Amino acid sequence: MLAELKGLNEECGVFGVWGHTEAAQITYYGLHSLQHRGQEGAGIVTTNGEKLTGAKGLGLISEVFANGRLHDLSDGKSAIGHVRYATAGGGGYENVQPLLFNSHSGGLALAHNGNLVNATQLKHQLESQGSIFQTTSDTEVLAHLIRRSGYKDLKEAVKNALTMLKGAYAFLIMTENEMMVALDPNGLRPLSIGVLGDAYVVASETCAFDVVGARYERDVQPGELLIINDEGIHSERFSMNINRAICSMEYIYFSRPDSNIDGINVHTARKNLGKRLAVESEVDADVVTGVPDSSISAAIGFAELTGIPYELGLIKNRYVGRTFIQPSQSLREQGVKMKLSAVRGVVEGKRVVMVDDSIVRGTTSRRIVNMLREAGATEVHVRISSPPIANPCFYGIDTSTHEELIASNHSVEEIRQIIGADSLAFLSVEGLLEGIGRPYEGELKGQCLACFTGRYPTEIYADTVMPHEKA
Amino acid sequence: MLAELKGLNEECGVFGVWGHTEAAQITYYGLHSLQHRGQEGAGIVTTNGEKLTGAKGLGLISEVFANGRLHDLSDGKSAIGHVRYATAGGGGYENVQPLLFNSHSGGLALAHNGNLVNATQLKHQLESQGSIFQTTSDTEVLAHLIRRSGYKDLKEAVKNALTMLKGAYAFLIMTENEMMVALDPNGLRPLSIGVLGDAYVVASETCAFDVVGARYERDVQPGELLIINDEGIHSERFSMNINRAICSMEYIYFSRPDSNIDGINVHTARKNLGKRLAVESEVDADVVTGVPDSSISAAIGFAELTGIPYELGLIKNRYVGRTFIQPSQSLREQGVKMKLSAVRGVVEGKRVVMVDDSIVRGTTSRRIVNMLREAGATEVHVRISSPPIANPCFYGIDTSTHEELIASNHSVEEIRQIIGADSLAFLSVEGLLEGIGRPYEGELKGQCLACFTGRYPTEIYADTVMPHEKA
Amino acid sequence: MLAELKGLNEECGVFGVWGHTEAAQITYYGLHSLQHRGQEGAGIVTTNGEKLTGAKGLGLISEVFANGRLHDLSDGKSAIGHVRYATAGGGGYENVQPLLFNSHSGGLALAHNGNLVNATQLKHQLESQGSIFQTTSDTEVLAHLIRRSGYKDLKEAVKNALTMLKGAYAFLIMTENEMMVALDPNGLRPLSIGVLGDAYVVASETCAFDVVGARYERDVQPGELLIINDEGIHSERFSMNINRAICSMEYIYFSRPDSNIDGINVHTARKNLGKRLAVESEVDADVVTGVPDSSISAAIGFAELTGIPYELGLIKNRYVGRTFIQPSQSLREQGVKMKLSAVRGVVEGKRVVMVDDSIVRGTTSRRIVNMLREAGATEVHVRISSPPIANPCFYGIDTSTHEELIASNHSVEEIRQIIGADSLAFLSVEGLLEGIGRPYEGELKGQCLACFTGRYPTEIYADTVMPHEKA
Amino acid sequence: MLAELKGLNEECGVFGVWGHTEAAQITYYGLHSLQHRGQEGAGIVTTNGEKLTGAKGLGLISEVFANGRLHDLSDGKSAIGHVRYATAGGGGYENVQPLLFNSHSGGLALAHNGNLVNATQLKHQLESQGSIFQTTSDTEVLAHLIRRSGYKDLKEAVKNALTMLKGAYAFLIMTENEMMVALDPNGLRPLSIGVLGDAYVVASETCAFDVVGARYERDVQPGELLIINDEGIHSERFSMNINRAICSMEYIYFSRPDSNIDGINVHTARKNLGKRLAVESEVDADVVTGVPDSSISAAIGFAELTGIPYELGLIKNRYVGRTFIQPSQSLREQGVKMKLSAVRGVVEGKRVVMVDDSIVRGTTSRRIVNMLREAGATEVHVRISSPPIANPCFYGIDTSTHEELIASNHSVEEIRQIIGADSLAFLSVEGLLEGIGRPYEGELKGQCLACFTGRYPTEIYADTVMPHEKA
């Protein structure tokens, strides 16, 4: 929702379960808890040991599986599922995952969270060899690599194929009788495994485990390939070149506050970022307010450390759905708002600290600052619980190009003027690392900071396609 | 949403605008901001000075007016609209408001928030005289009373009809060339007027004014009848028996936190209730958490006063829509959750204060306490920011019968045991009155406390129909 | 379908069943066979002896009762239903029948086929007495008259009310424990009763009896009121002024060919009209073709009598549904057709007799003649199996005003020129009467010929509303 | 529609246009006229010279392109389209055609009518070489063969691929700048070309030309490959082994009566079949009736030759849509009918000749005979305007297996007893050939008679998949 305001969109979320009599249902609830990672489409593929069966569609998981379609999957004992993020353009049914490929020698289903930086090159090579692609999704590349590998043994075929991929990926791969789980050597996207009775579960975020009643076991490791079947679970490494670089934005913005990444709770991390932010850039003010929903935790942390009361200075309208009619330009100029409104009763006559988690293009921040002033705030101090985003992401987050990123072309003071704030401060990179507090060694503590620093953990190619360029 | 969990449902919300070239659009956005007051149906009637035109339907306002239906109303220069709450049963298109009655002598449109306690009697009398009712809505009663009054002058007909009604009502009445606004002599439901350029606006809550860019003028007074037309606005009293008794639950639970009622901001009132609650029943604990969304303000107040950190211990899933499939009993027993989940990373090993705004049947509270314990809370102390609800409401809130209200049959200690909390405390009636802090004279400070005390501000009849019994 | 081409639309069809364990289902199939009489909306009301339950909606009967809604009516043991014709304008849910009125003294459901010529007057009178109308349907007038009659006994109330109505009506009226069936004193619309095991059935056309497996008993008589309940069936007269005047267009155009009216099969009547037409205006030609669907029977009769072979010279496209996109003007000029096309392989180089059942505005005829010529017909002779329609209908058929009726303002020769035919002939009024061959005494043989002759069987008022003017 | 009754379903219809500013619209109307060849799904792909754009979906063409989707294709100057037949099973979006494959070297779209008898073998070979199939359609086989051919030149690649296919196919293939049209060496399915101003059109049936205002040019020849681009049209042969064998059922049952195949009008052919049938097996009777819609022409021919009057003895209900509720077994036993009913007024007391075009399983014939008897027919003589279908079709018609075909296991006399007719006669193979009257040399006159004689014009393999086995 707010993501739309910002133009910061996650690629997707994946969920899998092996060995549960209600596999499809479990996957439905698991995906439902990951719905914030993608609202464009959703799908589930199950296996009953003999055959893969799938159902997918555009829309929310509850929309896709309305009308009894979940029942068609009910004899599956294992399943993988996927939620896909909202692109601007329409269409896209083909790209909804899991992709399901049946052949005379058996089926193959794939669900993917991430973005491959060499997908274009691999696709061209494969097409030159006669492969036909039916989707614009880079996920299909892995399927072709597996089928063409020449290896009889699926595990070898998969390992061989994975070594050819570069970029960010958390893959769930399923055949009639096994599930494979793979994470890229940088571990850019989160992926965890858990246990639910006798069954294994895998999910992009641990909140899915809580929702389905599973117990968290551990995070999947960078460069790890897990093979799960009726015999149990088996782990292998498919890469020697391991270098953990979990996406920082997962902590800052994307993941649900009730998820843990590498053992660190996301809400707690955000609250700590708010506290660090308060230490780095305190301000004399009357109230602290956060931009709902993702900045609430940081705002509470900011308030707690400074002693300035936390208030609901901004309210989000929960009922902005797909069919909502946007106000005309003339109505907008007359002051018609939607999605977000400032609470006059709270901010009128007050000096307000407005905590937000990030600034992408700056337009949303300017609008909110303006809204607060119109509601009577005498001062608006903007505090951002992350460093300036000055570089595009190639790993599955739909930020923007350099041109569109306000921090790529403007100083903090310029941004302050543009958004019309009385003061503006971003969290420092050091503050970010310490606030999250990962115990990992090294300068970056196993985090990807590329969007802040421009130092990408993988090679980037001239033809690397960013998510929003696909459609 | 959470309302469904509790079985506490508001009847509706009304919005009107007189004299604006984009009257239907303004009403659309106004109603959108009142959507929390009713999600079953919505409608708008406009007048272009010659003819009333209406459109309505089941579903959210954005669903009802999808597909260009708003355009059909675009030549109206004034409009009234309505959002209706979700009943358990289906059907109900007829009952969606505004009701629109055309006759050879002109049209009449009505939108109503509230509940009449003598609707059954009036309806029987009218039917015995040959009237035919097409809805089960008590709103239609007023239309018949007006049409049968014998007065040539509409204002006199309306005033005469209003004197026959007993109970709670905030009415918007519109003909081709005027709008009337009436509030019952107890002012049980909120209703305010504002100004938008040259136009007048009326709304159930002031948040609608902020959303459409209007300026709040004042609350409509109990027993007041406003007549708005192209000449301006004119106020009359239709009752001598005025006794303000605004519904306390509007402050506690229903209204949006960014609304003001009689000049008091709802979020601020809730935060103060949380502080009073902390004073009345402090507890030694590690974290304070609120049940989203309506109890967040009170929880923050509780935390602020006690110094115990406020945390996001409970997370609500935003994507529980109409088509969501409820988990089977067996999955629920295995721990599959939806709507709400506890944040393990926040509550594990902690003594938790769980602040909620009310307890109706107790089932939801028990479920949440249990959820917190499963997520590792060592103690769960439940604090309710209102007194026990021991009596049904007859004024438009769909609580329940005496039998279903847990506080009607159990002591606080019994409730504590039933919900499984380590401790439980409700706010006192005095705490409630002082927390809200209305400056009104008298013991009750102009509030209705009937659901807590059983002292109803109007007569109640044996055949008074509660909202949930209609459908 | 073709009706739309012509602007000749039937008002509706009614069906009822008393005393069958699957009353709603029987009514569903009965209405389905009457679907040609109305495609805008459909509804069914059932009684289980204690309560009336209804469901209705816009669209075809199969659309309205998709999604299991029929099941909601499954405990009814008796039912009435209605299909409503397609108006140009949208909206109209309120007007879909049966109308259902519940009151504290019991329910009342009404289904109506026809048009009252004094509805406006009655409505104004009732409104002046305080009645409120919620529909623009004249059916509601009867409900008000019944409720206001003052008679305790429903039968007396109904009889009294019926005497106040003027115009065409076939009414089904149902309460919790009886069904009443009434036909206007002129018997303008068809209505028959049948027997299905122990149950009674009533329908606008006898084809409905064949479809549900019922046995035809007899036609309801003009001015007759039937009372059907668990004791059996009972007949009364409510008018002394009986003068049968069944609508001739039912034979010519509206009714299904497999229906019988007063014992005469519609297909056979049409075929005879075709034969009479051939006798009256034979022509030297190579092939006879009919405009599908309603003119096929007459064309076959024409061919049989003349010996000219009957061929499929015109084909109707069956798949022109609601969402069909009409060709743009430019495409239409390039020759893009829809709905109907001429069969080149049949008409090329031939002299064609094109038999149609009527001409309303002439535009359709012109288009078809042109189509046949473009497909290579060397001559096109148009033969119409009814006299020229020169007067509007006030009894439930949506023809048009005098201005729009081509035969109201033009001679046959002028019409021939306008439609571009080589020759044109209409059937004479005598030919019509003899072709149908009703055994009734008198000049008109119990038929209404008003649209041909202008002699209306009832009074007509200045403010009589024609069906297409309502909406 | 009736096809469903019989279990005789056509695979599909194709339409293409090259060089028209409203290419997508033209294709829409063309496909609309071919809708009888397939109702499950429809799609259109256009090219604007630079890019292929497609839209497709489940349902009728008017449903798929509701909501403005046709507009998305409006800048195309050429297009191909497809309608697909209704399979029993659901799903199948992927299989809706045209299939569209984009790659870095350009796009490829394919639309196919027919059935390949060696698709399974080709698919296994391709999968073993690493190809991934995303549909179960045999159409995709051609795409893979083209992409893997190794030829740089598309025409060579296509010709090479076509030589590997066996069975029935009419293919439309489109890239950004040319369209190819291919018909199998036996010419089993109909395919014609026409001219529309400066544009070329291709269609499964000539009725599409009439609908879009195009002029018929000629039928595509067996083994012919047409290449159409902005330079014009160019014809090549890709096979030396030409042997015309047009499907006889196209004349008898599938094609629209207004289409011509090899210059012979389908309605005229059917009428002649009816006459031949009358000559071969005349009968003393009172009325002739045809089973609508496809047998009407034959029935008229039968009546014309014998002088027995042709009557509408059977009526089809036009409103049996997707959501129609089938009557329960108990209602069916009570006589509830749908789809088809007998006209009592026509058949009662009469000796009836019922002309039908074919018998597949016999269940429909038995039901109709029974219906006629219940409606009072004293004798029912069944006359079939084709020989007994005793062998399955492998070329794109969804008949059935040997086991299900009643004529495969029973003599004519046995069939007569099963369907309960007083007499039964089929047309002879010689009567069929002479009735259609193709001027071609040879015993079979260029027709496929395999379903009657078992002599298939191509090889058949053990694993040949019949259409109904796919999905």
Image (tube, coloured by chain):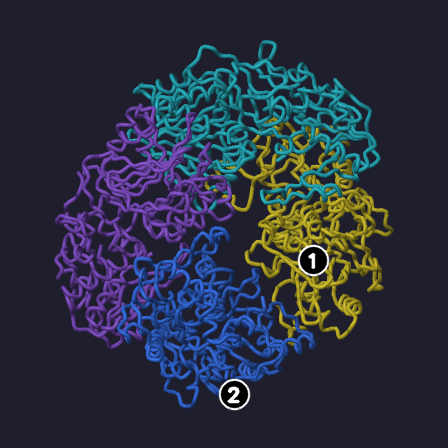
Chain colours: A cyan, B yellow, C blue, D purple
Residue A133: x percent and y percent? 40, 29
Q: Residue at x 26, y 66 (%)?
A: D300
The residue wearing badge 2 is: C239
Q: Residues within 10 Å of mark 2 (few under 14, many from 20)?
A: some
Q: Nearer the viewer, residue B260 or C16?
A: C16
Query: Chain for mark 2?
Result: C
* Residue A155, numbered circle: none
Side of D232 relative to D414 (left or right): right
Side of B313 relative to C190 (left or right): right
Q: Nearer the viewer, residue D292 or D198?
A: D198
Side of B174 relative to C383 (left or right): right
Q: Residue furthest right?
A: B441
Q: Are marks 2 and 1 on the same chain?
A: no
Measured along the vertical axis of the image, is residue B221 above or below residue A194? below
Q: Residue at x 84, y 62 (%)?
A: B237
The residue wearing badge 1 is: B46
Query: Chain for mark 1?
Result: B
The total of numbered circles placed on residues is 2
Side of D41 relative to D68 (left or right): left
Measured along the vertical axis of the image, is residue B205 above or below residue B304? below
Q: Quadrant of residue D146?
A: top left
Residue C59: x percent and y percent? 49, 60
Q: Callout 1, which amino acid?
A: Thr
- Image quadrant in which the N terminus of chain A is located: top right
Q: CA distance from mark 2 to mark 1?
A: 45 Å
Q: Callout 2, which amino acid?
A: Ser
Q: Nearer the viewer, residue B171 or D286?
A: D286
Measured along the vertical axis of the image, is residue B183 above or below residue D232? below
Q: Secondary structure at mark 1?
A: strand
Residue A16: x percent and y percent? 44, 30
Q: Disc 2 or disc 1, which is closer to the eye?
A: 1
